Image (cartoon, rainbow, N blue to C red):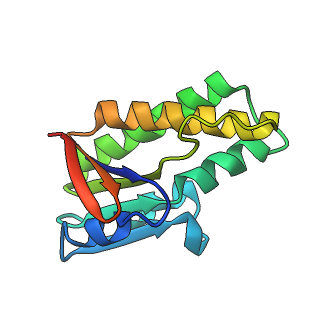
Amino acid sequence: MQLIIGGSHSGKRAFARQQSDALIWHSAYQGDSPEGWHTRVLPNHLLVLEGWECWLRDRLSAEDAPDLMTLRQALQHELQALQQAENEQGVEVCLILLEIGRGIVPIDAHDRQLRDLNGWFSQDAAGLCDQVHYLWHGLARAIKG
């Protein structure tokens, strides 16, 4: 599994496209649900999942949203399911994550929760991924693997 992380419009998608000719995109920006990736798994393809900050915001905004630690645990299970799909179904997984916050603490409590959850998710993803690339101004730096 690989992680591509960076700020907004930093070249993350372009870098992901360079990783494989056989790409499957699963994107919150195109209305895909976070659970829907299960139906798109194809062996010998790179499954790219992007828009996690949208999926995180939706989970936080849900009427029956659990506390942050319960949400984090659910996301850890989702990452493990992606890793399991890689191991069992021959698909390669690429997560594209938006680095948000850069140390700025928002006044709104909901915005703070989103940044906390996104930061924890990024840490958990980086811990599980074999490769981590940080993108800035279109330049990729391998920081793991």
Question: Is 46 on the left-hand or right-hand side of 113?
Answer: left
Estimate the x, y position of residue 130 in percent, counting from the top left: 20, 39
Closer-to-camera residue (80/20):
20
- Residue 41 shows in this picture: no
Closer-to-camera residue (137/4):
137
What residue is rendered at 24% in x and 56% in y?
140
Up/down of 18 relative to 100, above or below: below
Q: How many marks?
A: 0
Question: Is 22 on the left-hand or right-hand side of 82?
Answer: left
Q: Quadrant of the C terminus?
A: top left
- Residue 63 shows in this picture: yes
Q: Residue furthest top?
A: 69
What residue is rendered at 66% in x and 40% in y?
114
Up/down of 104 relative to 139, above or below: above
What residue is rendered at 57% in x and 74% in y?
30
What residue is rendered at 68% in x and 33% in y?
105
Estimate the x, y position of residue 95 in percent, counting from the top left: 37, 53
Question: Is 41 on the left-hand or right-hand side of 57?
Answer: left
Up/down of 82 relative to 69, above or below: below
Estimate the x, y position of residue 53 in percent, counting from the top left: 58, 51
Please identify the quarter of the rendering in which residue 33 is found.
Answer: bottom right
Up/down of 61 relative to 90, above or below: above
Question: Is 143 on the left-hand or right-hand side of 123?
Answer: left
Please identify the quarter of the rendering in which residue 73 is found.
Answer: top right
Please identify the quarter of the rendering in which residue 136 is found.
Answer: bottom left
Q: Residue furthest right?
A: 63
Estimate the x, y position of residue 9 in percent, counting from the top left: 46, 67
